[in-house]
Image (cartoon, helix red, strand yellow):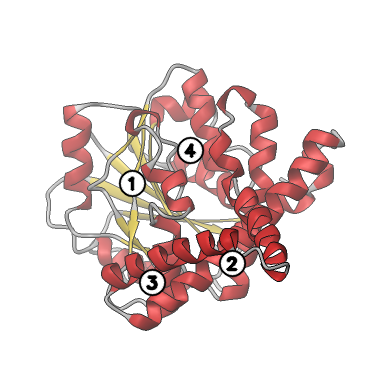
Amino acid sequence: MYFSFIIPVYNRPDEIDELLESLSNFTNAIPFEVVIVEDGSTIPCKEVIEKYVNTLSISYFFKPNSGPGDSRNYGMKMANGDYFIILDSDCIIPSNYLIEIEKSLQEEYVDCFGGPDAALDSFSDIQKAINFTMTSFLTTGGIRGGSEKVDKFQPRSFNMGLSKKAFEASNGFGNIHPGEDPDLSIRLWNLGFKTKLIKNAFVYHKRRISWEKFQIQVNKFGKARPILNSWYPEHTKITFWFPSLFLIGFLFSLILALFEVPIFIGFYGIYFTLLFISSLLSNKSFKIALYSLWATLIQFYGYGKGFLISYFKISILNQKPQEAFPELFFKK
């Protein structure tokens, strides 16, 4: 099996440098190539690519800006492999990554897989807190990953594998962003392809992000979900409502507490205590544990608010997604 790493990049030469360095340190003889797709960047990474031409089988393409999904599709069309591995530019890859993938696919082949993300010790405290919030079973990390059936996993495009056969049958990623990865997963299921989670095929997802950017990101995630629910109602889950219900319940609990009914806000206190302890045990840092509480509040507020606004516009007002949220759709 010949693997092609497909990596879209937009104005992130430093990230590409770290990513390619990690790929050049692989401890295996499994053949692979790297396909870099520059998505209309004004700060190109071509000079960085040239550093690795003697150590990696690497191709570089520059195209007009059309979004990450379209750039991934472009890269897969240009690739030579029969199995594509899609990564975000802000990932660092463990040296045994490809070994774990090949082993899992040999044991049980699927045409699409996803892997988890983790944090390196070198990451900033904010990055570690956001990573904890995005992966913890106590937050939407459980909804996004751990609570899903392993054989019905919706891979995320920062760490995702797709066979050439599945790409050609599905035409790859759609035009929505974010939300292009669950959209592709569902279309693959409808075409008869299987997906799975490869738990040992994790990447270090650096997420060069601020609190403000994180809020914008999760807000877009929330907006995208009701759109996907309207496209694929058979795959709607009650768990998708959890952040919104959490947000509404929190606001009502605060109001009731003002009227000397503190029991409900007490439940939230217990939850945040458990969250703090979990992060403290995981990260062994009081500061990161505190940051994790803030990251969770941002996550639930941003996602929950976005979900409610989108649900009202899409499901109640029956607005067209492209008209209700043009910022979620790239113009090709």
Front in this rendered view, residue 37 or 242: 242
Q: How many residues crowd around disc 4 within 10 Å: few (fewer than 14), some, or many (20 or more)? A: some
Question: Circles 2 and 1: CB distance less than 8 Å?
Answer: no
Q: Which residue is mark 4?
A: 77
Q: Residue at x 35, y 81 (%)?
A: 286
Q: Residue at x 68, y 48 (%)?
A: 307
Mark toward the start of the polypeptide (4 vs 2): 4
Quadrant for the N terminus, please: top left
Closest to the camera, between mark 2 and mark 1, is: 2
Q: Which residue is mark 1?
A: 115
74 shown above or below 246: above
Q: Residues under labels 4 and 3: Cα distance?
A: 35 Å
Q: Is residue 228 left or right of residue 158?
A: right
Residue 98: where, in percent of width, then height?
22, 48
Q: Residues under labels 2 and 1: Cα distance?
A: 24 Å
Residue 234: where, in percent of width, then height?
59, 22
151 shown above or below 291: above
Amino acid type, mark 4: Lys
Q: Residue at x 48, y 71 (%)?
A: 293
SS for callout 2: helix
Q: Which residue is mark 3?
A: 128
Mark toward the start of the polypeptide (1 vs 4): 4
Front in this rendered view, residue 95 or 131: 131
Amino acid type, mark 1: Gly
Mark toward the start of the polypeptide (1 vs 3): 1
Q: How many residues crowd around disc 3 within 10 Å: few (fewer than 14), some, or many (20 or more)? A: many
Q: Residues under labels 1 and 4: Cα distance?
A: 23 Å
Q: Which residue is mark 2?
A: 298
Q: Residues under labels 1 and 3: Cα distance?
A: 18 Å
Closest to the camera, between mark 4 and mark 3, is: 3
Q: How many residues crowd around disc 2 within 10 Å: few (fewer than 14), some, or many (20 or more)? A: many
